[in-house]
Amino acid sequence: VPREVFPLAITAAKTVLDHDLVMIPFDLEAAGVGRTVFAYPGTFVKLAGLVNGHGPEIVSVERLMDAIRDSKNLISGHNTTGFDFVALARHHGLDLRSLIGRSFDTDLMVRLDDPPRSGRDGISAMPKGYYGLDQSSPRYGGPAKSDDLSRLAKRYGGYDMIPDDDPEYRSYLDGDIT
């Protein structure tokens, strides 16, 4: 997520850390939505993308893991603690403890800045998708998502069936990290 999208998040991250790190926003596209990360039997992470000094780039999972393992990098993204880091830990051996003090989840920052109101029986009264990137990014001055991934999944018969080289699929990932 670009710096201008969540200025509160960037400020908070820099305050917590006692040295200046290079922020590496990233995202994954996976073989399933609605399937748990732990139950998927095959290659779960289909595409990986990050933003480096040259802009957004689709990279191999191995290259992404190298960027994450590099201790000078602050790794950021949206819902990384709820999905991306878990997928990388489960399927690619990411040591989650190595991210303590140098990971940043904009989903958590949005929830801290605009906490969910409690509804009936303590269930959040926020509208569905309220904290998702496609709704929260525009509220903080960023762009809305450019495409609907479920449409591609329907066209190809499932998220795991979308070809990795499909231009719309790659564009969707690019939109999540820029």
Image: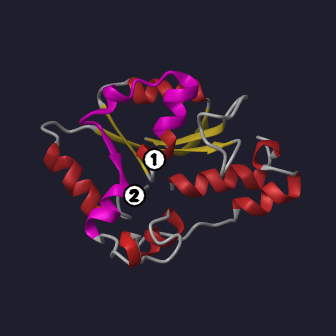
Q: CA distance from mark 1 to mark 2?
A: 9 Å
Of residues 27 and 126, the one nearer the viewer is 126
Residue 73, percent from left and from top:
33, 33
Amino acid at pointer 2? Asp
**Which is more foreground, mark 1 or mark 2?**
1
Residue, disc 2:
107
Instruction: Name above or below for residue 99 compared with residue 113.
Output: above
Residue 92 drawn in magenta: yes
Query: Which residue is at a point 25% across and 63% down the rendered structure image?
Result: 8
Query: Which residue is at a point 49% across and 28% down the rendered structure image?
Result: 89
Element marked by disc 2 = helix
Residue 152, percent from left and from top:
79, 58
Residue 80 drawn in magenta: no
Amino acid at pointer 1? Gly
Instruction: Name above or below for residue 92 compared with residue 163.
Output: above
Of residues 178 and 133, the one nearer the viewer is 133
Residue 100 showing in the rendered view: yes
Main SS category, magenta section:
helix
Q: Which mark is first along the chain, 2 or 1?
A: 1
Residue range corresponding to the magenta coloring: 85-113
Residue 140 showing in the rendered view: no
Residue, disc 1:
82
| Contact flag, marks 1 and 2 (Cβ < 8 Å) | yes
Query: Which residue is at a point 39% across and 58% down the rendered structure image?
Result: 107
